Amino acid sequence: MDAPLRPGEVVADGLAEPDGPRLRIIGRIRSRWGAGDCPRNIGTARAQGGVGKVELDPTFAPALDGLAVGQPVVLLYWLGGARRDLLRQSPRHIQGTRGTFAIRSPNRPNSIGLATVRITSLDVAAGTMGIDAIDCYDGTPLIDIKPWVERADLPPAR
C-alpha cells in the first residue's frame, strides 16, 4: 500500500510496481570512455580529465530539483558487461585473491557501479547534469542519483 502523499509531492503515473524488486533505468551516463580505454576507478578518471554527463529519461527530470552545481552526488549505474558469478577474485593491483565484497570490482552478483562525483552543470528542465568525472562506458544505464551527505556518508570515527 502506498503511503499518502505529503504536500508538494509529485508522482509519475504508471511507475508503481507492487510485485517485487526491479531495477528501473532512469537515464544514461555519457562519457568519453569505451571498452578499450575506460579507467578502472574514479580517481584515474579524474586524473585523465574524464568529465561526463547524466541524461535522464524525461519522466525523471523533475527529480533533479533541489540539487545544485558544486554539490557532490552518488551515482549508481548498471555494469552490464561484468561477470556476475565470481565469489573470489584476483585483481591485478593486489597480491592474492579476495572475496568479491572486499574489492570494488564491477564483477559482482548485481553489477552495480557506484561513483561519488561533483555536479558541474545542471539543467532540471532538460534532465541533464554535468559531472566532474566518471569511470564507465558511454551510454551506461543509470539506476539512481543520491545526494552525498557528510553526516550520513562518512563512517564513524574509530
Image: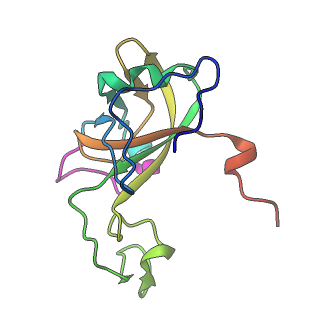
Q: Is residue 84 above or below residue 11?
A: below
Which quadrant: the C terminus?
bottom right
Residue 113, by quadrant, is bottom left
Q: Is residue 153 visible?
A: yes
121, above or below 50, in the image: above
Instruction: Judge from the rendering whether residue 75 lies leftward or rightward of residue 35; answer left or right.
Output: right
Q: Residue lying at the far right in this picture: please name it.
A: 158
Residue 28 in the image, given as x and y percentages of width and height: 28, 36
- Residue 82 in the image: state x and y as whole percent: 25, 64
Task: Tell me which corner region of the image, top left, top right, bottom left or bottom right, holds residue 133.
Answer: top left
Q: Residue 53 location, x and y as percent?
A: 34, 29
Q: In the figure, is residue 54 to the left or right of 5?
A: left
Viewer-closest of 105 and 42: 105
Residue plotted at (29% across, 27% down): 57
* Image-quadrant location for residue 155: bottom right
Outermost residue, top direction? 125
The residue segment tinted magenta is: 33-44
Q: Is residue 76 positioned above or below 79 on the image?
A: above
Let me know if residue 36 is in the magenta part.
Answer: yes
Q: Is residue 157 one of those drawn in magenta?
A: no
What residue is drawn where x is 59% and y is 32%? Answer: 4
